[in-house]
Image (cartoon, rainbow, N blue to C red):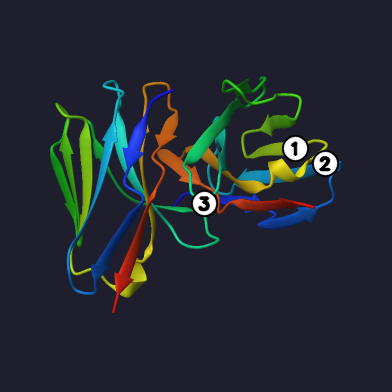
């Protein structure tokens, strides 16, 4: 079946640095990828939708300059958390649309210290 | 955005049935999904139902959809300790966006 690989699974970074999270569709082409953030004991929140070759569409309240999304190919989308702060610590999950459905990555646990 | 609501906790004994409920607000939802999340892991798709269906059964899982009341439920028969996890319902809108509930933490006691 369709597989989405998300990397890294865990990352700890210092406050003020940037972190890049990759989301790859391994056996299908993903024309659209979605990025979600999960707050503790709360739901997954859709952050942005990215279409290959075009700018991402951000949900209301999500800072596009802070969460940079690049979808340069049909199999790869990246989320870069710039100038990370402790409040950015969260679980980030990507989802790819293609191959007949939606497939989620395994998530990235980001801890900013 | 769309509101999807679930109760936060459910505790059952092993062998009993579990019923997790979900309500949503967007009447244009195309598909409704149930996902399972184990600690530290991503989302695992359990099952889904198309919005024009009332029920779907898949082994131990039964999904019921009441479109009039915008109510979705997931029933797990013969619940096992391995079923302990957080269960998310989600609706997919016509714009291919997913909106998730807050998740129901299922605790299965031996």
Q: Quadrant of the N terminus of chain B?
A: top left
Say which residue label 1 marks.
A80
CA gap between label 2 and label 3 equals 27 Å
Say which residue label 3 marks.
A3
Q: Residues within 10 Å of mark 3 (few under 14, many from 20)?
A: some
Specify whether disc 2 shares its chain with disc 1. yes
When the figure is inspected, residue B71 is found, relative to residue A51, above or below; the finding is below
Q: Is residue A72 left or right of residue B17?
A: right
Q: Give residue B70's position: percent from left, percent from top.
A: 21, 30
Specify whether disc 2 shares its chain with disc 3. yes
Q: Chain of mark 3?
A: A
Q: Is residue B97 left or right of residue B82?
A: right
**Residue at 39% across / 48% down in the picture?**
B103
> Quadrant location of residue B24?
top left
Front position in the image: B95 or A85: A85
Q: Are marks 3 and 1 in contact (CB under 8 Å)?
A: no
Say which residue label 2 marks.
A18
Q: Quadrant of the C terminus of chain B?
A: bottom left
Indicate the secondary structure of the residue bearing disc 3. loop
**Residue at 17% across / 46% down in the picture?**
B56
Front position in the image: A49 or B23: B23
Specify whether disc 3 shares its chain with disc 1. yes
């Amino acid at each position: 079946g369709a597989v989405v690989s998300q990397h890294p699974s865990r990352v700890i970074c210092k406050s003020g640095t940037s972190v890049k999270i990759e989301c790859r569709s391994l056996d299908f082409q993903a024309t659209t990828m979605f990025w979600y953030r999960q707050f503790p004991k709360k739901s997954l929140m859709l952050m942005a939708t990215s279409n290959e070759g075009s700018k991402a569409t951000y949900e209301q309240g999500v800072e596009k300059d802070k969460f940079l999304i690049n979808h340069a190919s049909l199999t790869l989308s990246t989320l870069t958390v710039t100038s990370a702060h402790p409040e950015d610590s969260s679980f980030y999950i990507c989802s790819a649309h293609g191959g007949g459905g939606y497939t989620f990555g395994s998530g990235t646990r980001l801890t900013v210290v | 955005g769309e509101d999807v609501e679930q109760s936060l906790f459910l505790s059952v004994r092993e062998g009993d049935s579990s019923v997790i409920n979900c309500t949503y607000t967007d009447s244009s939802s195309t598909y409704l999904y149930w996902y399972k999340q184990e600690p530290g892991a991503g989302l695992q798709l359990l099952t889904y139902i198309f919005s024009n269906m009332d029920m779907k059964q898949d082994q131990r899982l039964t999904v019921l959809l009441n479109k009039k009341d915008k109510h979705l439920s997931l029933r797990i028969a013969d619940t096992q300790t391995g079923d302990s996890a957080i269960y998310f319902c989600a609706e997919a809108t016509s714009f291919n966006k997913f909106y998730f509930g807050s998740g129901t933490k299922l605790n299965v006691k031996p």
